[in-house]
Image (tube, rainbow, N blue to C red):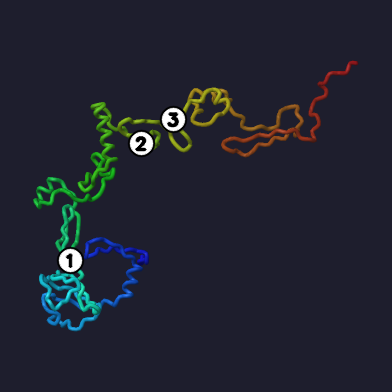
C-alpha cells in the first residue's frame, strides 16, 4: 500500500528531545521548497575540510556528509551552525550557503541506528551473525535430556506436535515423546481413573467386537458412566423386535413390533388344508358337457389361479323331469 498525503511521521527534535508529528504532504512541500540534498560521502571532523579526501573546499547548499568517526573536538575549519564542539560516528552534517555554516544532525548513537548484533534468550537461539542473524527456537526437552546434554540450555523450547488419540491408545498407541497430550485426551484418561477410584477393581471400559457384524449395540461413552442401548430392528439395521399380539396378526400390522413366534406361525399353518387343489376340470355323469368354461393361469410364485364361468349359450342345464307335477 502506498503512502497517503495524510499519513504522519513522528519526529524527535534534537534541540529539546520532544516528539512532533509531520504529515507526508507537509514533508513533500517542505522538501520541494528547500534546496536539494546531495550526499557527498564521509567526512572526518577531526581534521580540516581541506584535508578530506577529496577536499571540501567550496560546498554548496544541501551538501551532506556522514561523520566517519567520533570527533571529541571538531576541527575549527568546520563552522557549525549550533556551535557544536564534538560529533559522533554516524552523525550527519549538511551545508547552508546562506549562513556559511554546517548543521549537525546527530544520530543518537555511533552506529546510526543500524543493528550490529542480536542476542537471543533461551529458548531462542541465534547463530551469532551480527549482520544477518538466523534466529531459531529450541525444541522442548525433559530435564533428564537437558542434564545429559550438559549444555546449560535448560528444558524450555517449542513442542514438535500435539498428540492425537492414536498416540495414547493403551498397548497400541504410538506413545511418541514428540507429541504433547492435550486436555481432551488427558480428560479421557482421568475419567477412567475416576471410574476406578469409585469402583476399585471394577470394569473400566465397555466395548464390543461386533463379531456378528450387525452393529446392533450402541455403547456411549465406553468408560465412566457407560450407557448401552440396543437398536430397534428395521429393514436397514439389526436390532430388537416385539412379538405381535392377536390384534396385530388380525390386522396384518407390519414393523418390529409385529413379529410372530413359532406358536403363532404354527397356528396359522394348522388351518390350511393338508392337500391343495392341483387343477379343476369339467366332468362327471349326467352333465351338460361344455356348459362350464374352466381356465387356469400360469404358475406365479408357486401359485396359479383357476377361473370358472358358465357358457353364455348354455340355457338352464337342468333335468326338468325331476320337477314336481302341477296339481291344480
Q: CA distance from mark 1 to mark 3?
A: 76 Å
**Which residue is located at x 26 percent, y 40 percent?**
169
Q: Name the disc covering residue 210, or none.
A: 2
Tell me which numbered mark, 1 or 3, is placed earlier along the sequence.
1
Helix, strand or loop status at disc 2: loop
Residue 129 located left or right of residue 34: left
Tell me which numbered mark, 1 or 2, is placed earlier along the sequence.
1
Mark 1 vs mark 3, foreground winner is: 1
| Residue that mark 1 sits on | 131
Residue with the most extreme right position: 328
| Residue that mark 3 sits on | 240
Instruction: Please tell me how crowded label 3 is: few (under 14), some (14-19), or many (20+) other residues with Cα within 10 Å.
Output: few
Q: Position of residue 279 (x, y in %)?
A: 64, 33
Q: Nearer the viewer, residue 5 or 269?
A: 5
* Depicted 73 relative to depicted 53: above or below: above
Mark 1 vs mark 2, foreground winner is: 1
Q: Name the disc covering residue 80, or none.
A: none
Q: CA distance from mark 1 to mark 2?
A: 66 Å
Instruction: Please tell me how crowded label 2 is: few (under 14), some (14-19), or many (20+) other residues with Cα within 10 Å.
Output: few
Residue with the most extreme top position: 328
Q: Position of residue 203 (x, y in %)?
A: 28, 29
Q: Position of residue 10 (x, y in %)?
A: 28, 62
**Which residue is located at x 14 percent, y 78 percent?**
77
* Depicted 57 relative to depicted 181: above or below: below
Helix, strand or loop status at disc 1: loop
Q: Quadrant of the N terminus?
A: bottom left
Tell me which numbered mark, 2 or 3, is placed earlier along the sequence.
2
Residues at circles 1 and 3 in contact by the CB criterion of under 8 Å: no
Residue 186's image quarter? top left
Q: Position of residue 157 (x, y in %)?
A: 19, 50
Amino acid at each position: 500500500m502506498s503512502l497517503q498525503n495524510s499519513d504522519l511521521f513522528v519526529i524527535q527534535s534534537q534541540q529539546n528531545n520532544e516528539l512532533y508529528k509531520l504529515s507526508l504532504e507537509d514533508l513533500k512541500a517542505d522538501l520541494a521548497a528547500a534546496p536539494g540534498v546531495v550526499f557527498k560521502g564521509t567526512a572526518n571532523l577531526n581534521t580540516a575540510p581541506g584535508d578530506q579526501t577529496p577536499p571540501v573546499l567550496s560546498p554548496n547548499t544541501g551538501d551532506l556528509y556522514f561523520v566517519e568517526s567520533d570527533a571529541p573536538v571538531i576541527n575549527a575549519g568546520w563552522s557549525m551552525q549550533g556551535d557544536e564542539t564534538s560529533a559522533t560516528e554516524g552523525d550527519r552534517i549538511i551545508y547552508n550557503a546562506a549562513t556559511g555554516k554546517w548543521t549537525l544532525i546527530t544520530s543518537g548513537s555511533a552506529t546510526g541506528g543500524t543493528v550490529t548484533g542480536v542476542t537471543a534468550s533461551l529458548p531462542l537461539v541465534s547463530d551469532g551473525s551480527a549482520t544477518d542473524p538466523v534466529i531459531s527456537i529450541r525444541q522442548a526437552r525433559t530435564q533428564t535430556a537437558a542434564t545429559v546434554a550438559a549444555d546449560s540450555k535448560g528444558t524450555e523450547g517449542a513442542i514438535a506436535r500435539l498428540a492425537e488419540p492414536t498416540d495414547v491408545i493403551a498397548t497400541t498407541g504410538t506413545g511418541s515423546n514428540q507429541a504433547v497430550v492435550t486436555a481432551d485426551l488427558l480428560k479421557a484418561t482421568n475419567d477412567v481413573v475416576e471410574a476406578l477410584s469409585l469402583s476399585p477393581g471394577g470394569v473400566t471400559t465397555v466395548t464390543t467386537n461386533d463379531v456378528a457384524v450387525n452393529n446392533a449395540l450402541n455403547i456411549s461413552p465406553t468408560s465412566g458412566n457407560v450407557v448401552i442401548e440396543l437398536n430397534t430392528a428395521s429393514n436397514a439395521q439389526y436390532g430388537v423386535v416385539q412379538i405381535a399380539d392377536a390384534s396385530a396378526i388380525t390386522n396384518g400390522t407390519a414393523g418390529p413390533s409385529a413379529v410372530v413366534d413359532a406358536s403363532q406361525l404354527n397356528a396359522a399353518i394348522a388351518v390350511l388344508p393338508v392337500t391343495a387343489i392341483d387343477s379343476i376340470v369339467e366332468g362327471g355323469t349326467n352333465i351338460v358337457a361344455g356348459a362350464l368354461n374352466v381356465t387356469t393361469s400360469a404358475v406365479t410364485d408357486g401359485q396359479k389361479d383357476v377361473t370358472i364361468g358358465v357358457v353364455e349359450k348354455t340355457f338352464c342345464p337342468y333335468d326338468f323331469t325331476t320337477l314336481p307335477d302341477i296339481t291344480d
